[in-house]
Image (spheres, helix red, strand yellow):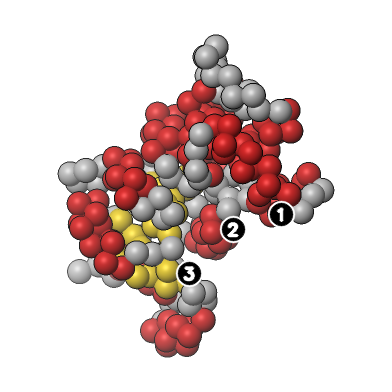
Amino acid sequence: MAPLAAYLPKWTVTRSRATVYHTAIFMTLRIAIVEDHREIREGLAQLINATPGYRCTGIYASMEEALEKLPKNLPDLLLSDIGLPGMDGISGVRILKERHPELLILMLTVYDDNERIFDALCAGASGYLLKKTPWVKVVELLKEAVDGGSPMSPEVARRVIDLFREIKPPKEAEYDLTPHEVRLLRMLVEGHSYKTAAAELHVSVNTIKFHLRHIYDKLQVHTKSEAVAKALRHGLTR
């Protein structure tokens, strides 16, 4: 049988068991994986466990398995593929966000078409990463998601911006957003975290959170991912 590395994407690199053991005491961020290819999901689990500050708490071969077992050991963040046997990843995200609104979900997939990107974000995904993303960058983006950002691979971010230009806001979508609130909402959609948005606007993180509460009230949403999805559906940041 070919070695594990032969089945993994080019960005995956495994480390020794000694390294995994040595870093175990530093693990804090709990991550689960939904991926139908065994070699890839096991390789991802090894990478996560070999990275200080991260721990893989579950690997699932299908969304059906994840929906059944995930509540027993809910992670901080879920990495999910889209093209899965049975229920696809996007449909699973909708169900998971209904059941566990606080769960952060990032898509990790090979698909980079507008339709899947749009549907995933509208379903409640907090970010969208391509599998060709280098692992070192993926680690940074996982932390960014936990810090309140909406991480996306550069190619995906460009497509999201293109989607804004294509979508015309319906006349009935009047949410009375101020220019400053529209700007802040646009920054969230583009992948900014609370911290990076505060730095760019030269305000504190608490000020960003204060304005976001008003935005959420006006949009009648409760989370950042819901706000991003609504902005995409109605072209609110054009």
Q: Are marks 3 and 2 in contact (CB under 8 Å)?
A: no
Is 79 on the left-hand or right-hand side of 219? left
Q: Earlier in the sequence, mark 1 or mark 2?
A: 2
**Residue picked out by circle 2:** 147
What kind of element bears circle 1? helix
Is 2 on the left-hand or right-hand side of 113? left
Q: CA distance from mark 1 to mark 2?
A: 11 Å
| Image location (x, y in percent) of residue 14 | 41, 72
The crowding category of the residue bearing disc 2, from other C-alpha atoms within 10 Å (few below 14, some 14 to 19, many at least 20), is some
Picture disc at residue 29: 3
Give the residue at x 77% y 46%: 200
Nearer to us in this view, 211 or 133: 211
Is 91 on the left-hand or right-hand side of 230? left
Q: Quadrant of the N terminus?
A: bottom left
Q: CA distance from mark 3 to mark 2?
A: 12 Å
Q: Is residue 44 visible?
A: no
Q: In the image, what residue type sits under mark 3?
A: Leu
**Does residue 142 sit above or below 89 in this rendering?**
below
* Residue 112 image-quadrant placement: top left
Picture disc at residue 205: 1
